């Protein structure tokens, strides 16, 4: 059965495996180790050199309006999750991320970036799903692009030294996330 171009674009944009009938629910569509650039800007125009080993000084604004930086997480293994309110797989995985966050804090930090979303919709979804880990804004998708994101949701594992050790664009179940953290972050 052929999918229309709009259906393919929607499937690709949310990390769906709709074009691959061999994929099963919860199975990663992709799993790669990647690197991101060090940058002090979140604009897409500053992301051309996305080929360094560490997350660097990426600055952002939390949902509460305060400023933050990925350097604030130095010394702690960190799970970074890129999500949007319009992405069904993102919505499904948020409670699983919250459960793992509660289990592993403070050994592992969690940070969620809302990508290119309407702020009110993002905040409502965070409240609805019960997420308590820090959430930040990525209104122009600049941070998502710095990390080389291409599908939603995307999860990045960063070790205590700030090195990106794993990146996956797929919906994760709690047990999958725990296994990735154990394998790549040693926690």
Image: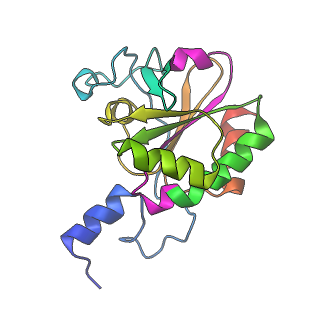
Residue 101 or residue 170, whichever sits in front: 101
Q: Quadrant of the N terminus?
A: bottom left
Q: Position of residue 91 (x, y in %)?
A: 52, 57
At 47% from the left edge and 16% from the top edge, which residue is drawn?
Answer: 56
Residue plotted at (36% across, 29% down): 146
Q: Which quadrant does the C terminus fall into? A: top right
Where is residue 74? Give x, y as percent.
Answer: 62, 16
Q: Position of residue 156 (x, y in %)?
A: 53, 37
Left or right position of 10 against 169: left
Quarter residue 161 falls in: top right
Residue 120 vs 174, above or below: the answer is: above
- Quarter residue 166 falls in: top right
Left or right position of 48 against 53 = left
Residue 88 drawn in magenta: yes
Residue at image position (47%, 21%) is 53
Q: Which contiguous range is marked in magenta?
A: 68-90
Q: Is residue 63 magenta?
A: no
Task: Kindly give the residue lying farthest to the right in the view shown.
Answer: 103
Left or right, residue 142 beside residue 90: left
Say above or below: 72 vs 42.
above
Q: Nearer the viewer, residue 162 or 116?
A: 116
Q: How many marks?
A: 0
Residue at x 76%, y 33% (from the top left corner)? 105
Q: Position of residue 99 (x, y in %)?
A: 73, 49
Height in image: 140 above or below 22?
Answer: above
Residue 80 in view in this figure:
yes
The answer to whether residue 179 is seen in the rendering is: no
């Amino acid at each position: 059965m052929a999918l229309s171009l709009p259906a393919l674009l929607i499937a690709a944009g949310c990390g769906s495996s709709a074009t691959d009938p061999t994929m099963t629910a919860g199975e990663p569509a992709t799993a790669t180790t990647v690197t991101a650039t060090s940058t002090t800007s979140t604009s897409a125009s500053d992301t051309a050199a996305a080929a360094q080993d560490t997350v660097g000084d990426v600055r952002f604004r939390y949902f509460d309006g305060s400023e933050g930086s990925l350097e604030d997480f130095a010394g702690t293994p960190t799970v970074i999750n890129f999500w949007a309110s319009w992405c069904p797989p993102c919505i499904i995985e948020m409670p699983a991320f919250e459960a793992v966050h509660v289990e592993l804090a403070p050994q592992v930090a969690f940070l969620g970036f809302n990508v290119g979303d309407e702020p009110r919709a993002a905040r409502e979804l965070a409240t609805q799903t019960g997420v308590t880990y820090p959430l930040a804004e990525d209104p122009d998708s600049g941070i998502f692009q710095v990390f080389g994101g291409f599908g939603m949701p995307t999860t990045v594992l960063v070790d205590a030294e700030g090195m990106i050790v794993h990146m996956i664009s797929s919906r994760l179940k709690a047990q999958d996330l725990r296994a990735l953290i154990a394998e790549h972050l040693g926690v």
